[in-house]
Image (cartoon, rainbow, N blue to C red):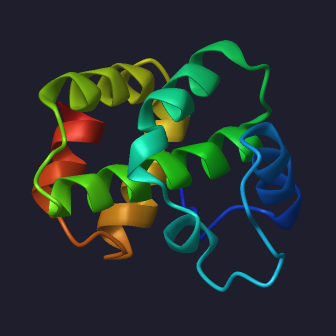
Amino acid sequence: MTREFYGCTTDAQRSINVLLSLPATGKEQDWEFELADPNRIGEMLQASATQNLNYDERCALSLLLIASMEERSAAGNLEGDLIRKAHMLFNNNAELRAAMMFYWIELHRSSDDELMRKILLG
């Protein structure tokens, strides 16, 4: 299953900005990269599991989560437990996983395809 996904909506970004109290200005070009925060991955995973989010908001939060995980991995300190938790999130939502596969892998937005495969495919 491939679901074309080219980025999250502005409304979804605003919702996640509020949910996570992000320092957004509304002028971000690459929202998920500019607001990625490797120190808040646990909080993002928790929000994904506990908040009542619509599909667009789930996609926005997923973009932010994955960008944050890539940043932390590049710094050399992404724990396997966080990768497993993220994988479980996407494993439980095929539509969301397909959208993230398209965005990060098929559109070549990821700087670490191996990490993307671990997160999205296990």
**As drawn, is 84 to the left or to the right of 99?**
left
**As drawn, is 33 to the left or to the right of 110?**
right
Q: Residue furthest top?
A: 50
Q: Position of residue 115 (x, y in %)?
A: 17, 51
- Which residue is pictured at 19% across the width and 54% down the height? 73
All told, the count of numbered labels is 0
- Which residue is pictured at 37% across the width and 63% down the height? 104
The answer to whether residue 83 is above or below residue 101 is: above
Residue 67 sits in quarter: bottom left
Residue 122 sits in quarter: top left
Locate the N terminus and report the quarter of the image it occupies.
top left
Nearest the eye: 2 or 78: 78
The answer to whether one can see residue 82 in this image is yes
- Which residue is pictured at 79% across the width and 84% down the height? 27
Nearest the eye: 105 or 34: 34
Residue 30 sits in quarter: bottom right
Q: Position of residue 2 (x, y in %)?
A: 44, 51
- Which residue is pictured at 77% across the width and 29% down the height? 53
**As drawn, is 71 to the left or to the right of 12?**
left
**As drawn, is 68 to the left or to the right of 115?**
right
Q: Position of residue 57 (x, y in %)?
A: 74, 43
The answer to whether one can see residue 2 in this image is no
The answer to whether residue 114 is above or below residue 78 is: below
Q: Position of residue 26 (x, y in %)?
A: 84, 76
